[in-house]
Image (cartoon, grey):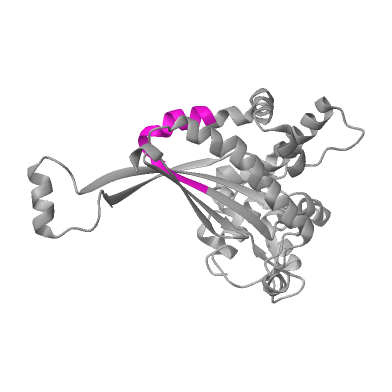
Amino acid sequence: MNKMNSIDRNIEEPEQPVRNAFIFLVNHSRSPDAFSKEEFKNFVNYPNPDNFDTYFSKKFRHILEDAPNDPGKFLVSGVFKKFSKWEKFKAYFSQSSRIKANYIEEYFRKLMIFEFFMPLTNENDLRSSLDEVFYKDTIKLALNRIPKNELINAIPKNEEESDVQYIERICNWISKRFGGYSIQSVRGRFKLSDLKTFAEVALIREKGENYIIDETTAIVRFIFHIGNPIMNQVSFDFKQFNEDLNNTSLTREMIVEANQIRFIFKNLFVRSILDLVNGEDEIWMLESGIINRLYIWKNEAAQ
């Protein structure tokens, strides 16, 4: 490539081949053209050609990817962007650790997503309350609030299990499914009564009352997966998406698991949230995923 000489190659050995490799990679990172190992090797020009083969497997291969349309040839991987400056590349080359991990792709076809919508004024108390579900002690206390027959009906108890073992098993079951939650803030505008005319709203404002209010809402999101994961090497091919279209049915086991998650979620999370934000006129929760539901809990005193 005609840009190869844009970086000085007159550097003392043994750094020169590394510098050559850097020049080659920089220029090919800007090009859509694939290159062969031999082309790379010839440009790097190690005094001992065997050294290139050693470094190719230990270093260079981690920042290259197979060219999809040219078997046996390569492209510069996006990970090279981390080392596109000479000093960073030289430091990488002198380290023994790998910089590109091999990933296994794991995905679930069935999800349950719960989202609470409530005024941001409750955020701190909400976080404090929800953080309790990270601890086995408070989980056990919450489970003890559930009538025993209802809990066993939802999650059957094995004959050989003691009460302690049963509760421990449920805690482990929860631990595998609940990893955490996320909170985001969104701004919204709401009316406080039935639809009014401009004249009617003017009268409301004369009384010092509001018809429309701006409110920042906290959305608390929980995501649960159903069933066992599909595990593959990381794939970017189109075929995998077509396969998913033919695998959308729920098995009996998935339905049972979904109902168990819904039961535990309402008894642990919803109960805690309703206790915490006592006094709000309404609390909304959206369930999506395998089914769509909108729950609205209304304060009886406000009706």
Q: Residue furthest right?
A: 160
Does residue 11 lie above or below 231 as drawn?
Answer: above
Query: With 212 as the anchor, is 198 left or right in this view?
Result: left
* Image quadrant assignment for residue 26: bottom right
- 251 lies left or right of 123: right
> Looking at the image, which is closer to me, 107 or 73?
107
Could you tell me what secondary structure mostly forms the magenta stretch?
Answer: helix
Bounds of the magenta span? 115-129
Residue 121 inside the magenta-drawn segment: yes
The image quarter containing residue 28 is bottom right
Q: Is residue 96 visible?
A: no
Q: Is residue 160 above or below residue 56?
A: above
Residue 271 rendering spot, x and y as whole percentages: 55, 35
Residue in view at x 24 percent, y 46 percent? 213
Residue 288 x/y as whole percent: 56, 57
Q: Residue at x 70, y 57 (%)?
A: 108
Residue 136 lies, in percent from the top left, at 69, 26
Q: Tell me, yes or no, if residue 33 can be seen here.
A: yes
